[in-house]
Amino acid sequence: MKTIIYSEKHIGGLKLSNRLIVSPMQQNQGTPEAFATDYHVNHYGRLAGGAAMVMLESTGVSPNGRLFSNDIGIFTDEHVTPLKKVVEAVHAKNTPVFIQLTHGGRKSWRNGGSRLLAPSPIAYDDEYGIPEEMSLSEIRSEIDNFRLAARRSLEAGFDGIEVHAAHGHLVHQFLSPLSNHRTDEYGGSPEKRTRFLRDILEAVRSEVGRDYPVLIRVSASDFTEGGLTPVDVAKISASLEPLINAVDVSSGGLLPVNPAATPEGYQVPYASIIKQYVSIPIIAVGKIYTKELAEFILTDRLADFIAIGRPLLGDPEYIRSTFFTSEVEAVGVHSN
C-alpha cells in the first residue's frame, strides 16, 4: 500500500506527483544587478527530480526591496531571460517550479541612497534603522511591482507564484499590528491590515488568471505579545481563500526575537491550526527531516504538503535518499 507521501495532490489546477516540496532558500549568488546566473541554473537543476515541486528563492519585485546585495530580482524585463534558464533546468527533470515574490520593506538592503520603506516608521532594529512611512502612491506603486513581477514570471515559464507575506518582510509588516500603526485604509483593523496583501493578490490574478497556482507564505506567530497569533493568521488566510490556492506556513521574522524552542516539526502546530480554517492545501515546513515524521503529519491531516529546505544545502540528494524507495519509482518519480 502506498503511503500518503507518494500520493498525488493538486495545488490549484496543477497536479503534483507527491507531497514533498523544495522550500525557498536564499543562495546569495545573484549579480549586483539582481540577475540569476549559471550558479542558479546548476543549483536548482540539481535539486529537481525528486520533490514534486521546487520553490525558487526570494526574488525581489523592486530594486529597493531586495533583501541582500546579491539577491536575485524580477523587476525588469531583462531579468526574465536568466530566470527562464533556471526554469528550463528544473523542467528538464520533469518538475514544476514556482517563484517566490518578495519586497523586504524595512528589512531591505539599502542600495546606496535608496529609501527604506515600510507601512509605519518603526525600525526592525538599530542596524536597519527607521524606515519611511509609505505614501498611498508608494503603496500603489509596490502593488503594481508585484503585478509586473507576476507577468514576468509567466514569461519566464514558472508554474506558480508564492507571494512572500512572512518573515518580517513588507507584506508581513502590513499584516502585523506591531509594525503597522497606520490609520488609513491600510491600517487599523485586521481587514485593513490585510488590504495590502489582498490588493497584491488581486493584481497578480489580473496577470495570471484564475486557474494559475498562487500561494502565500505566512508567519503564523510574531513570538511577541500583541503580535500575530496562529488564529489571527488563520482568519487572514481564510479571508483570502478565493484568491489563493495554498498556504505555506512558517513563523517569526517580524522582530529580532526567536521562539523558546525549535524541536523537530516545531511549526507544524501552526499549520494544523490554519488548516482548520481553510479548504485549500497547507504546506508545513521547519525541521521535518524524516519520512516517519512527514508521514505522521500527512496521515493526521495536520498539513497537505511537506517542504524540505536546509538539509538540501549540504546534500542535494537528501530528499531522494531519505524519502524515496522503489515504491516511489513505480509511480513515476524522476530521480535522474
Image (tube, rainbow, N blue to C red):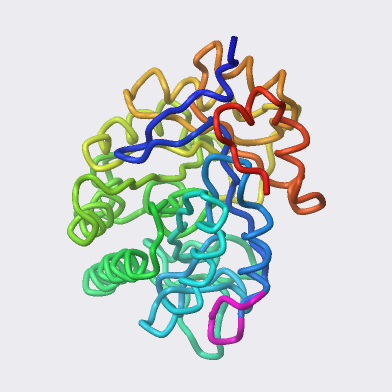
Image height check: is 10 above or below 317? above
Image height check: is 80 above or below 230? below
Residue at the image point whose x is 68% and y is 49% from the top: 336
Task: Depth check: give the residue in front, 330 or 314.
Answer: 330
Residue at the image point whose x is 26% and y is 58% from the top: 204
Q: Is residue 81 visible?
A: yes
Q: Quadrant of the N terminus?
A: top right
- Per the picture, the main secondary structure of the magenta-coloured stretch is loop
Q: Quadrant of residue 298?
A: top right
Is 4 magenta? The answer is no
Does 287 sit left or right of 81 as displayed?
right
- In this view, the residue farthest toward the bottom is 112
Residue at the image point whose x is 67% and y is 28% from the top: 266
Residue at the image point whose x is 53% and y is 35% from the top: 221
Does 140 sit left or right of 33 as displayed?
left
Q: Quadrant of residue 292?
A: top right
**Marker count (numbered):** 0
Task: Depth check: give the residue in front, 85 or 271.
Answer: 85
Q: Position of residue 97 (x, y in %)?
A: 48, 53
Is 37 magenta? The answer is yes
Q: Position of residue 21 (x, y in %)?
A: 56, 40
Task: Depth check: give the residue in front, 243 or 228.
Answer: 243
Q: In the image, which residues are magenta?
A: 31-38
Q: Position of residue 234 (x, y in %)?
A: 39, 29
- In this view, the residue farthest toward the front is 330
Image height check: is 222 above or below 302? below
Task: Depth check: give the residue in front, 218 or 324.
Answer: 324
Q: Position of residue 268 (x, y in %)?
A: 59, 25
Does 327 sit left or right of 215 as displayed?
right
Q: Is residue 134 visible?
A: no
